[in-house]
Amino acid sequence: MTATGERHAVVVGGSLAGMLTARVLSAHARVTVVERNRLDDAAGSGPRPGIPQARHTHVFVEGGQLALESLLPGILGELSARGALPVGMPYDLVQHQSGRWYERFAASTRFLSCTRGLLDTVVRERVLAEGGVDLLAGTGVTGLVGDAERVRGVRVRGVRVRKRGAADDPYEIEADLVVDASGRTSRVPTWLGEIGGEAPDEETIDTGQGYATQLYRLRPGAEDPGYHCLYFLPDTEQPLTGVVLRVEDGLWVASLSGPRGSEPPTDPAGFLDYASQYPHPYLREWLSTMEPVGPVHSNRSTANIRRYYERPGRRPAGLLVVGDALCAFNPIYGQGMTVAAQQVVALRKVLGAGSGVAGGARGGAASGGGVLGRGGRRTRDVQRALAGVAETAWAISAGADRALPGVESTGPGPNALDRLTGRYLRRVAAIVPGDPGAGRHYRSVLALTAPPARLFHPRIALPALFRAPRATPGEPPLVVEGWPGGEG
């Protein structure tokens, strides 16, 4: 049921995180999504402007699919009808890491493959069709509106906005709740200082990786390759990542990435030559048989960034932060969209447990009671619940990236326990390519359906610690019985 009462929430950003948040809030208030880009300028389901990663490889792992379907029942079927593809791991993949090819065992989990443009379009259309949400596109937020109370601290009362390309002065939109879903480049930390609040502590882990992406399609009459994804994984000795992923409309997205100073070029010939640097010639050989579609696009926004809004400080009531604005991950791990969807599920649960969001800075109750209802949850309590959702994904991405050479970090470096855990995980990674049982548990963590503790399950720990890795194919396993799809 959609609420159409007096209460009003503003969501900054019409991304996946923003639209899903708007859908949940619409059960408690009237919602306005403020999106700086003119979405109607994009043809069809093209990439949404303003997302650095929009033209590059995207996947929705199982944990994200479960969250998305619970928020918008039937949405996975809608995406599938428009070309999104379930990719079984490891059955539908040809994977290479540390000099070894993975066996293509029966799938134990699946991720959803499609372009970011298709995903954003289907989710946005569905949320707007449900009602209770207004989209104010082509409008940029220029600051927060708030007040400082000597007793109860700071409270956000709305946002200041300006129509893009207009000469008019900014104007204010009042709101009982403002949610920042503006992504990794969020300016909210700066705006907080302007209304008497404090910016959150921030941690950055930056490997310096740069991406380049080229769309391809099979040439007329070409034979299907017999898989949905070709994946070269990096390690401490081999820093290059390569993903060639089947998406909708008969297209393949090829994303190549390298470390700082060795980023892939953005001209088609140079992009293809860059593929020669990978540890097996198959990547370049296969790309050279395909037909390029459009230009090569690059992206350098790959740092892990975590902002600790849940920590003590002069935090305003009436403000929540979700998605990449709260915790952004290196895109190589394919976690960002899933964590955002899971955070919105957590938000729905918290709002359902109380009558809204209340609270002020330093734990005080804001005047007027709850933001979306009197007697509701304090803002910081809700923010803490959202932050907790990111823990598993952060442990995976931050833990792996801290170990890479050349990484730049603002947080603490690895301690003795981190180094010991890293050695153990390298042994785990060595057994997974040839061990279906260990791989099943390992992939459940990567799919964000199981906690990191699952990596110490006896089915993983015993072979990792006491057995030599099993033999795996010496060449790319291009043909497996029973392909395509299914359970193998």
Image (cartoon, rainbow, N blue to C red):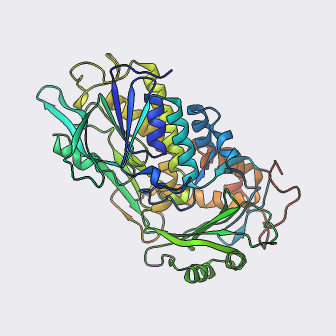
Is 84 left or right of 41, judged from the image as shown?
A: right
Q: Residue furthest top?
A: 375
At 68% from the left and 73% from the top, the residue drawn is 99
Query: Considering depth in this image, is 235 or 227 the residue closer to the camera?
Result: 227
Q: In the rendered image, is residue 199 in sight?
A: yes
Q: Position of residue 201 (x, y in %)?
A: 29, 48
Q: Residue furthest left?
A: 150
The answer to whether residue 412 is above or below residue 238 is above
Q: Position of residue 302 (x, y in %)?
A: 44, 62
Q: Residue furthest right?
A: 481
Is 132 left or right of 433, judged from the image as shown?
A: left
Q: Position of residue 380 (x, y in %)?
A: 32, 31
Q: Position of residue 135 (x, y in %)?
A: 41, 39
Q: In the rendered image, is residue 239 in sight?
A: no
Report the number of numbered marks: 0
Query: Considering depth in this image, is 401 or 337 the residue closer to the camera?
Result: 337
Is 410 left or right of 399, judged from the image as shown?
A: left
The answer to whether residue 158 is above or below residue 463 is above
Query: Considering depth in this image, is 33 or 61 the residue closer to the camera?
Result: 33
The answer to whether residue 394 is above or below residue 72 is below
